Image: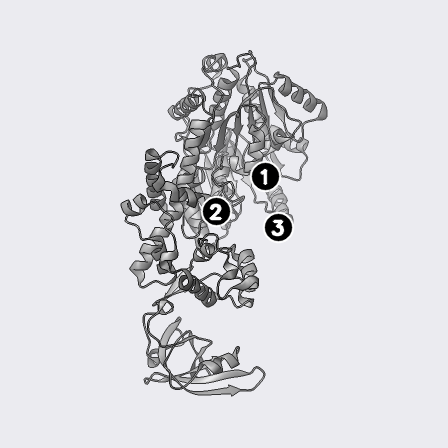
Amino acid sequence: MDIVHRNIKYLAGVGPKRADVLASDMNVVSYDDMLQLYPYKYVDRSHLYAINELRSDMPYVQIKGRFYSLTTVEGRQQRMVAQFTDGTGSIEIVWFKGLNYIKGQINSTDEYILFGKPSVFGQKLTMTHPEMEKVVAATMETSPLQPFYNTSERMKNMGLNSKAIHKIVRNIFVEVGVSGIEETLPESIVRKCNLMRRGEAICQIHFPQNTPALENARYRMKFEELFYIQLSLLKNRNVNRTKSSGIVFGKAGAYLNQFYKECLPFEPTNAQKRVVKEMMADMSSGRQMNRLLQGDVGSGKTLVALMVMLIAIGNSRADGARYQACIMAPTEILAAQHYENLTGMLKQLDVRVELLTGSTKKKARTEILKGLQEGGVDIVVGTHALLEDTVVFNNLGLAVVDEQHRFGVAQRARLWAKASVPPHILVMTATPIPRTLAMTVYGDLDVSVIDELPPGRKPVQTEHYFHNSRNSLNRFIREQLQQGRQCYVVYPLIEESERMDFKNLTEGFEYMKEAFKEYDVCMVHGRMSSDEKDEAMRRFVSGESHIMVATTVIEVGVNVPNASVMIIESAERFGLSQLHQLRGRVGRGADQSYCILMTDFKLSQETRKRMEVMVGTTDGFEIAEADMRLRGPGNIEGTQQSGLPFTLHISDLVKDGPIVTYTREKAMELLAADPLLQMPENAVAVRRMSDIAKENVNWSRIS
């Protein structure tokens, strides 16, 4: 049995009880899992300090010498005290635990190496509970670079501290040897890319000879990890392209042509035209479209989605039945906004558009469900309500999912299972995704990017104000209002401090009413009824209200071109992605718009960087890259719901971007020569992907 499948409980030093803790706390079940429990840091122990060099402000140090006395001191807490010398001076070594064990380990004839933190107690130089080993011939355990492993409290209680983990890993090598660790990359890849062998690489990671060997070993294992993510995603995409038959939309159709000629309010940008052409090519190819549409705030993704939906309903089956389309949004506000936009743009077309959400009244719901089942409804806009079993389509041809990261894989699968032939899929996000993350999270999707804003749009000017600048801010707001503009004032609303946030919001509302008595101020928040929210929104959209004080309920779904000022209160409490989304509520007209970030003066270094990024750029892709650098890939908007859809043991998508790109190139080269990985020399890759797939359920079905 190979190490991938060999259970860790049978390894020397583990046993059933420790195995249970390793499985529950570290997801370690097999020998291979244990070998992939990589150190999180290394301490260089190649340097030996003389005792007369030691100071109490030094970090961990290593000394070499002999013990010349050992005494047990009674008191409130029994302790053991030894004197240790190297000829240049002496230091007092103290233990409070494991005293009998320590007594059995120490003698005055052997030489020892101690590793610990020097301190001063009672004017004496001391070291408490140092790591200790006898000076012996060099072995794997006496590497100059000492590894440190993450452990849990339960593990420590079972004796599984960092040093114990290191010994368990050593026992694997004692049992199977370096040569017993099978190669998991095709020979052609190892050779072409000049990679270290897997067994040697894992040994060097746990028992590094020196820093260059460690770096080479880490590169090899990062390459393997990222290569198999890319290979799995690309192979899955190839299979979809060759085997996933799709509805053939052979023509643009009368609806799109009429819309383009008679209804389009403005000429689409070149980027919008390009992505529509890409989607038309997909949908006429005979294979299922599976495409991600990325576009910054205000770039016109909704118009693109509408044009593609018009293509769908402009085509029909052989029996004459017209295809239907749906668009699913994560919130009722966003769904309602899509519905208003679509119906507004389709007034002159004979197209039936309906809105289906949890708030849809029973009578209207019954009519909509009947229309969907009989084919009378052409386009339905909805929320999670579209996933209910009662929603049955007559002939679903296209499913659009907006802000797709808010929906789980199983939810999306339920949507496109509502058609006998899988519908074409378009997933959209207004949260630009860093290139390296897009390659790894959405690597099996075709990606379209709208990378230009509609003509006439001016970049939003962003400024960072402190709370003591309130008077000058009010003067600026008044100037904008006098020019006929409108203003948003947004407050954070975070569940853990909801009461405090609600108090801040209502106080802010009262303050704005007092400061701007001659203007109408409205308020919108989640505690209001739908009717109250709708009325406040209506007043602001119509221009009756001049200032809207709101929570992040207006992050998406509000489009008021006349609003030119966005004030974000307590901006330090928002992430970069959310700040960028809020800023996108202004700058939708031809006038210069402004985003003001209000914060306390005392800010953490990371918060200051966030403010600097927002002031410095309006490019959503730059912001997404900065967000990933600051917070890591598993926390940026788009992946934070459930973390990354695969396990990374050693790679870092922020720091290892060049390796991501390189492994994708190599995976593409391998698949170009062997699309289905059927050649004998690639059998090792097929086996490895199978093992990884068991660890990462659904990892290749991201869309």
- Real-space CA distance between mark 1 and mark 2, rounded to the nearest whole angstrom: 29 Å
What mark, if any, has residue 634 been given in the picture? Answer: 2
Residue type, label 2: Gly
Is residue 163 or residue 678 the one in the foreground?
A: 678
User: Residue 103, position in %: x, y?
Assistant: 48, 83
- Real-space CA distance between mark 1 and mark 3, rounded to the nearest whole angstrom: 16 Å
Q: Relative to residue 286, is residue 603 depicted above or below?
A: below
In the picture, measured across the screen, residue 660 lies left or right of residue 301, that is left
Is residue 80 or residue 498 the one in the foreground?
A: 80
User: Residue 164, position in %: x, y?
Assistant: 47, 67
Asked where in the image residue 617 lies, by quadrant, the reply is top left
Q: Which residue is mark 1?
A: 550
Q: Secondary structure at mark 3?
A: helix
Q: Are marks 3 and 2 in contact (CB under 8 Å)?
A: no
Res 246 seen here: yes
Q: Are marks 1 and 3 in contact (CB under 8 Å)?
A: no
Q: Which residue is drawn at the image coordinates 34% and 62% (left, top)?
A: 208
Is residue 10 or residue 556 the one in the foreground?
A: 10
